[in-house]
Image: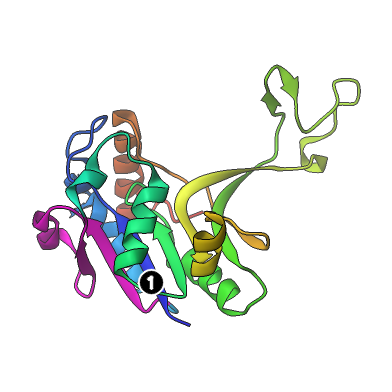
Amino acid sequence: MKVVALVPIKLNSQRVPQKNIRELGGRPLLWHVCNTLENAAGIDRVCVYCSSDEVVKYLPDGVSFVKRPKWLDEDEVKGAQIYQEFMSQVDADVYVLAHTTSPFLSKESVERGVAAIRSGEYDSAFTAQRIQTFCWYKGEPINYELTDVPRTQDMEPVWVETSGFYMFRRELFVNEGRRIGHRPLIVEVSPIEAVDIDEPQDFELAKAVAAARAEGSVAYE
């Protein structure tokens, strides 16, 4: 079973200019998740999928550069189009889609997902954060009754997908266009691992976390 990690990257981003190459903890942002994937057991190859050769100088040793068509950088392009094009260029049995915006993703979480799919028990895996508090959607509570308010520790948790990773078998995406299958493993991640950099303030939070980790005052938990 060949497992390939895909890290799609655009060097120019709108909300946080040059986000992927901005420094975080002494390294460019994109370096962190690539390094985690490269050191995770069970992954045969890590590929950065980018239209610009300039990205190569920012990559950790061992990570491959796969050049993607420039049209995939357009704002209206959907993720599924990127995955489909990559899969036409790089063959694998299992793909690990990961994002640079989750720099604190742990090697242990990645390895747990890969092992689950390799075992044959699961057809996919994804990272999610457990939310065990009072949640609403479209004006209504979704995990408790207003007439019977439970203790939070007794509530049914709500799972929120994070940008850490999505792992899926090739045939799942080819046949059904899905990155989460019928037998997925939810890999629970900590609030630190769940940090996702989309806005400028997110980057400031990530810098604070990186600094605290460097000082030894915070770990992944």
Q: Residue at x 77, y 36 (%)?
A: 152
Q: Looking at the picture, which amino acid does disc 1 mark? A: Val
**Residue 119, relative to residue 187: is it above or below?**
below
Crowding near pointer 1: few (<14 within 10 Å), some, many (20+)? many
The image shows residue 187 at horizontal and vertical percentages of: 58, 59
The answer to whether residue 89 is left or right of residue 173 is: left
Q: How many marks?
A: 1
The residue that mark 1 highlights is 4
Q: Residue furthest top?
A: 139
The quadrant holding residue 181 is bottom right
The answer to whether residue 142 is left or right of residue 102 is: right
Q: Residue at x 12, y 53 (%)?
A: 52
Q: Residue at x 51, y 72 (%)?
A: 114
Q: Is residue 102 visible?
A: no
Name the foreground residue: 195 vs 30.
30
The image shows residue 105 at horizontal and vertical percentages of: 42, 57
Is residue 62 magenta-colored?
yes
What stretch of residues is rendered in magenta? 43-68
Q: Residue at x 49, y 72 (%)?
A: 111
